[in-house]
Amino acid sequence: MNLTFSWRTLVGPLLLITLITLAMTIQSQYQENRQLKRSNQALRIERDAAWAQLTHHEKTGGAVTLAARMINHFEGVRYKPYFDGGGVLSVCYGHTGNDIALNKTYTQAECNKWLDEDLLKVKKHVDPLIKVKISALTQAAIYSFVYNVGIGNFRHSTFLEKLNAGDKKGACEEMKRWVYANGKRWKGLIFRREVERILCYGDLIGFVASEVAV
């Protein structure tokens, strides 16, 4: 299955991040000032519009497409090999492995191919581990998360244990723990986990409602 062009042409690069940021902004505004000038009706309209767009993207793109967009944003693309925050040799969209030539400059096509292949590997290993029904949005969050932390860490995580026990909220909250590299908290990982956590809920409106009393 070739995903190289499908996920790139469906939506703008930052659509998913923009929608998630919208939810986080709404949450922050309510926590800081519950006496917003906008009416609850206007807020519901805004949420419904965002959810409609995200739901449309879920139906047309699917979990792998959504995950690819997230990885594209968070990882960025680097054509020359480098050592990441954990000291691991990487290239392109965070690809790792002994197939990286240290002194080579890779092309966009090669990076696209690796992203497609790496995501399919993540999907192949993750799907059998999940024993409960989840939405494509939750799947996308998990794929992005596992792409970053590795299948081994996910397989033995409290995250997976809680998810399979039916505690999806508790499972999604576990993502916030995975923000360290070399023993230090990384700002980039903190923000990434917040986005993945919100998407993990599988319901943007439900997430905001559960966090904030409207």
Image (cartoon, rainbow, N blue to C red):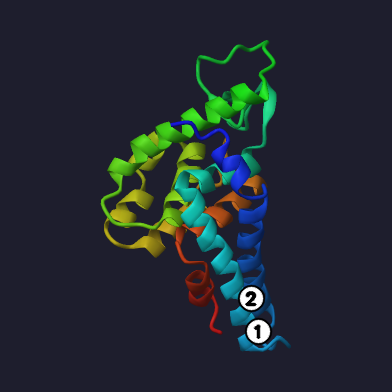
Q: State the image quarter where residue 36 is shown.
A: bottom right
- Above or below: residue 126 compared with residue 30: above
Residue at the (55%, 33%) spot, across then down? 4
In the picture, which quadrant includes the N terminus?
A: top left
State yes or no: discs 2 and 1 in contact (Cβ < 8 Å). Answer: yes
In the picture, which quadrant includes the C terminus?
A: bottom right
Q: Residue 81, how many percent across, how many down?
A: 65, 20
* Residue 108 appears in the rendering: yes
Q: Residue flagged by tag 1: what amino acid is it?
A: Ala
**Residue 129 as seen in the image, left or right of residue 209:** left
Q: Residue 79, how many percent across, how many down?
A: 69, 23
The front one of 192 and 140 is 140
**Residue 157 numbered tag:** none
**Residue 46 numbered tag:** 2
Residue at the (48%, 75%) spot, across then down? 210
**Residue 42 numbered tag:** 1
- Above or below: residue 71 compared with residue 135: above
Q: State the image quarter where residue 53 is shown.
A: bottom right
Q: Mark 2 falls on what kind of element?
A: helix
Q: Residue 119, how many percent across, how many down?
A: 47, 35
Q: Mark 1 falls on what kind of element?
A: helix
Q: CA distance from mark 2 to mark 1?
A: 6 Å
Q: Residue flagged by tag 2: what amino acid is it?
A: Glu
